[in-house]
Image (spheres, grey):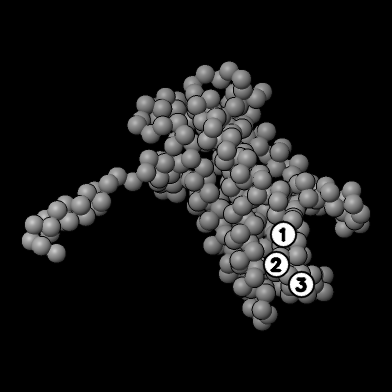
Amino acid sequence: MTVEERPRTARAAGSDLERPAPAWLVVAGGECREMWVGGRGPVLVFGFSLLLSVVTYLLATDKVLNYLEQREAVNLALQVAVSVGVLLTIVVGADAISGERERGTLETLLLTPPSRRQLAVGKLVAALSLWLAAFVVSLPYVWVLGRSTSVVGPAVLLGGVVGTVLAIGLAGLGVIVSGLSSSNRVSLSVSLFVLLALFAPTQLPAGARQGWLGDLLVRLNPVASGLHYVGAVLVDGHRWTRDLSYLVSPVLLALLAVTVLVSSADRLLRLQRGGSVG
């Protein structure tokens, strides 16, 4: 490299270092700070850890539950962690826009440089940070229940993949409902109703899910099909590729939610409430 080329290269490197971060990432950082520094994030994660502590204690010590094999115990704890973890993301997503409207901060937010699409993506990423925290908190509980088996590694990987896909879909759905709702109360109510409707089939007896109709209902439900896939690998010992078709609806939900959120950001992030839900 010649002497003349060195300053030019140094300037190019300096310009790369000074390049600003993407706007959506800046928005996500601000939303995360608001949620985790003096916000409700630590409270929600603390409540989540208490619930997992109770579930793990019962699975490990209660005589009624001792008949469960360790694989089944790990599967149950992991499914609780995924279910409650994605519940937290949809609750945060449901407050993302309607909450800003009610607090009178949406107008100020819309006057900032980031576009509405970037604002929507930043809010989605901030909601997903709650799932990430919940997943990290669940890892010691999974290890405690499965430490003497080889199921811990697959359980962690399954929970991370399936839980993240479900979290993206449900958090995106929560933000969409929040943008369409006339109030924060309506947004939270609609989001929780949708979540309960998605989780209801997972509580049906195993017999009710047998046959082609029961299997079809499970496959069409993103939450039920995702949790079914986890159980098939951990408890039934199926190969990871055998039941991949059960992940179609969770992946489609995630893709559809992100697509609708990005393409409809201008309509969702507005001060007027026309075309709202409820």
* Front of the two marks 2 and 3: 2
For numbered disc 2, what is the local secondary structure? loop
> What's the amino acid at mark 3?
Gly
Neighbourhood count class around disc 2 (C-alpha, 10 Å): few under 14, some 14–19, many 20 upward: some
Q: Label 3: which residue?
A: 237
Q: Is the C terminus in the top left, top right, bottom left or bottom right quadrant? A: top right
From the top left corner, tell me how far across and down residue 107 is, in percent: 42, 24
| Residue in the image at 60% along x and 27% along y | 181
Q: Which type of secondary structure does the marked residue at label 1 adopt?
A: helix
Q: Where is residue 8 in the image (x, y as percent from the top left)?
A: 14, 53
Rendered image: mark on residue 240: 2
What's the distance in space between the residues labelled 1 and 2, CA to CA? Answer: 7 Å
Most extreme residue toward the front is 2
Circles 1 and 2, Cβ within 8 Å, touching? The answer is yes
- The quadrant holding residue 193 is top right
Q: Is mark 3 on a helix, strand or loop?
A: loop
> For residue 269, which numbered disc appears in the image?
none
Left or right: where 94 falls relative to 69: left
Q: Mark 1 points at which residue?
A: 244
Residue 182 placed where, x, y %? 59, 23
Which amino acid type corresponds to the residue marked 2 in the rendered image? Trp
- Identify whether 168 is placed above or below 94: below
Point 73% across, 70% down: residue: 239
User: Which residue is farthest left?
Assistant: 3
